[in-house]
């Protein structure tokens, strides 16, 4: 196991109570360095966050300068320069018509806000009966109670079941495990669900454009979101594209929805929006959605102390300008091709069932049987063991479980900073192989 600090010596209530965590003291580009001088290749940007790489001084400088000027003003009493400038940048980058940004801190918060905005839109448009949410399984939208209700993460939901609200689930498109023309793949499942619930009761459909911590890098068929848009328009349902993970260039376009030529009613951004330099998220929407609020109650009924904060928006502004200045979205597309070319060689290895993704987002799914696609028994904890073996080999990857039915399914995700080089990609592949050898050995999997 890793060297590190051990609970309960430290006063920190750690996120992981079952293992020792190394102490990271510095980040440089795609690398993290611990207090023993060990270097880790950060192949998933932490949690799909460090898109620009670690240690970018100009972002730190921009935040420091803003903190010296004014760190905080409340968004109900004042506006501020960074929030205005960042919203202007996002207006030019977002799909046409998505002109207005509302800023929060985390992905879960902004998903909650997007769902609440959809509800408020319908209430203020004179259709208070529209309250139901449709989401997908597998799917992940966050861990606060409404976002968790809209997520299909049984191992997170079980404990808090009595507090969650009912959300209608439809199957997500998952090319590795779905029949090509099944209702999940064509979006017919969405129309079936809307008709079953009654269109007059459905407020919104929320989906990840490309699977993140759910179907792990699965890319839907090209016409999937065109069908979603048509079905939502036909039945008066708002479409929320949750780009918390895929947005800000991760898939090789600013918004992953651009790959599908579809504009949602509300789009969310988080994670990479500030490149991880501060917690920052945004929902972006159109005048159509805001108008009933302007004419009606006069404001969005979702108040949070840290919305529209000058300090966090200064970090977002510096990150977005850095992405533009260094053509990092184009670089994500270009290096994505290299990443997928090199990762595709892993498909031959034992236990590797599928390798997929788009841009600098990749998922590698492990299976017990490559022919039947049967997952490993959950008690083996294959993905977790692989992730630990990878960290021992100096490679940071993101594990995901529970996508292959019930609690089953093991995959890991690769989502490096956009500045990744050819040789660092080769290093990911080499360290992946080392970690896989160790995991197969530890799990007694015969090759
Ligand atoms: C698509 C998507 N939405 C929302 C969230 C929640 O974001 P956060 O963990 O910042 O609350 C995540 C996190 O992984 C995500 O992948």
Image (spheres, rainbow, N blue to C red):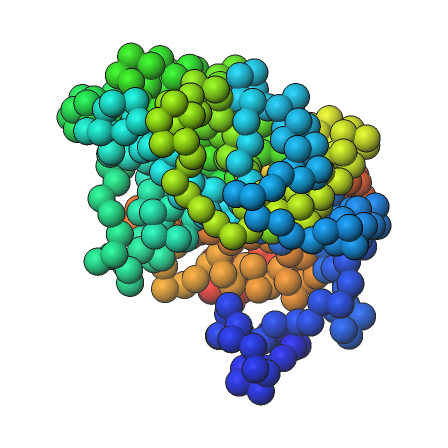
Write down the quadrant of residue 176 in the picture.
top left
Q: Position of residue 199 (x, y in %)?
A: 20, 22
Q: Position of residue 294 (x, y in %)?
A: 42, 25
Q: Tell me: 361 left or right of 352.
A: right
Residue positioned most to the bottom: 9
Q: Tell me: 426 left or right of 372.
A: right
In the picture, the quarter occupied by the N terminus is bottom right
Q: Position of residue 207 (x, y in %)?
A: 40, 32
Q: Tell me: 352 left or right of 346.
A: left
Q: What residue is drawn where x is 29% and y is 12%?
A: 234
Q: Tell me: 126 left or right of 178.
A: left
Residue 345 visible? The answer is: no
Q: How many marks?
A: 0
Residue 320 visible? The answer is: yes
Q: What residue is drawn where x is 36% and y is 64%?
A: 379
Q: What residue is drawn where x is 25% and y is 23%?
A: 126
Tell me if residue 284 comes above or below residue 385 in the rendering. above
Q: Nearer the viewer, residue 139 or 133?
A: 133
Q: Position of residue 444 (x, y in %)?
A: 47, 64
Q: What residue is drawn where x is 47% and y is 64%?
A: 443
Q: Nearer the viewer, residue 397 or 367?
A: 397
């Amino acid at each position: 196991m890793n060297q590190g600090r051990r609970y309960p010596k430290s006063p920190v209530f750690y996120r992981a109570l079952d293992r020792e965590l190394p102490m990271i003291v510095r980040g440089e580009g795609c690398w993290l360095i611990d207090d023993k001088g060990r270097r880790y290749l950060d192949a998933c940007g932490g949690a799909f966050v460090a898109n620009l790489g670690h240690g970018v001084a100009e972002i730190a400088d921009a935040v420091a300068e803003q903190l010296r000027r004014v760190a905080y003003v409340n968004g109900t009493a004042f506006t501020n320069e960074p929030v205005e400038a960042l919203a202007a940048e996002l207006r030019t980058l977002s799909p046409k018509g998505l002109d207005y940004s509302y800023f929060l801190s985390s992905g879960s918060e902004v998903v909650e806000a997007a769902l609440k905005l959809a509800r408020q839109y319908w209430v203020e448009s004179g259709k208070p009966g529209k309250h139901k949410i449709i989401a997908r399984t597998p799917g992940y939208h966050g861990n606060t109670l409404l976002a968790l209700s809209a997520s299909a993460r049984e191992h997170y939901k079980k404990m808090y079941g009595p507090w969650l609200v009912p959300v209608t689930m439809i199957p997500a498109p998952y090319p590795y495990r779905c029949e090509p023309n099944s209702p999940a793949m064509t979006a017919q499942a969405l129309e079936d669900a809307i008709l079953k619930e009654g269109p007059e009761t459905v407020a919104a459909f929320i989906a990840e454009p490309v699977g993140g911590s759910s179907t792990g890098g699965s890319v839907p068929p090209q016409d999937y979101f065109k069908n979603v848009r048509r079905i939502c328009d036909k039945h008066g349902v708002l479409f929320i594209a949750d780009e918390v993970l895929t947005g800000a260039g991760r898939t090789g376009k600013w918004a992953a929805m651009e790959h599908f030529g579809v504009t949602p009613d509300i789009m969310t951004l988080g994670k990479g929006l500030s490149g991880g330099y501060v917690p920052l998220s945004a929902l972006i929407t159109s005048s159509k959605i805001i108008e009933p609020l302007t004419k009606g109650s006069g404001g969005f009924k979702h108040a949070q102390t840290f919305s529209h904060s000058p300090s966090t928006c200064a970090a977002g502004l510096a990150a977005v300008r850095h992405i533009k200045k260094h053509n990092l979205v184009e670089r994500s597309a270009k290096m994505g091709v290299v990443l997928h070319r090199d990762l595709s060689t892993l498909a031959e290895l034992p236990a590797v069932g599928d390798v997929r993704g788009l841009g600098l987002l990749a998922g590698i799914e492990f299976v017990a049987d490559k022919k039947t696609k049967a997952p490993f028994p959950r008690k083996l904890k294959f993905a977790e063991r692989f992730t630990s073996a990878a960290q021992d080999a100096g490679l940071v990857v993101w594990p995901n479980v529970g996508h292959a039915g019930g609690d089953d399914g093991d995959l890991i995700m690769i989502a490096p900073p956009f500045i990744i080089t050819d040789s660092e990609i080769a290093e990911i592949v080499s360290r992946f192989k080392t970690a896989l050898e160790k995991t197969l050995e530890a799990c007694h999997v015969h090759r």
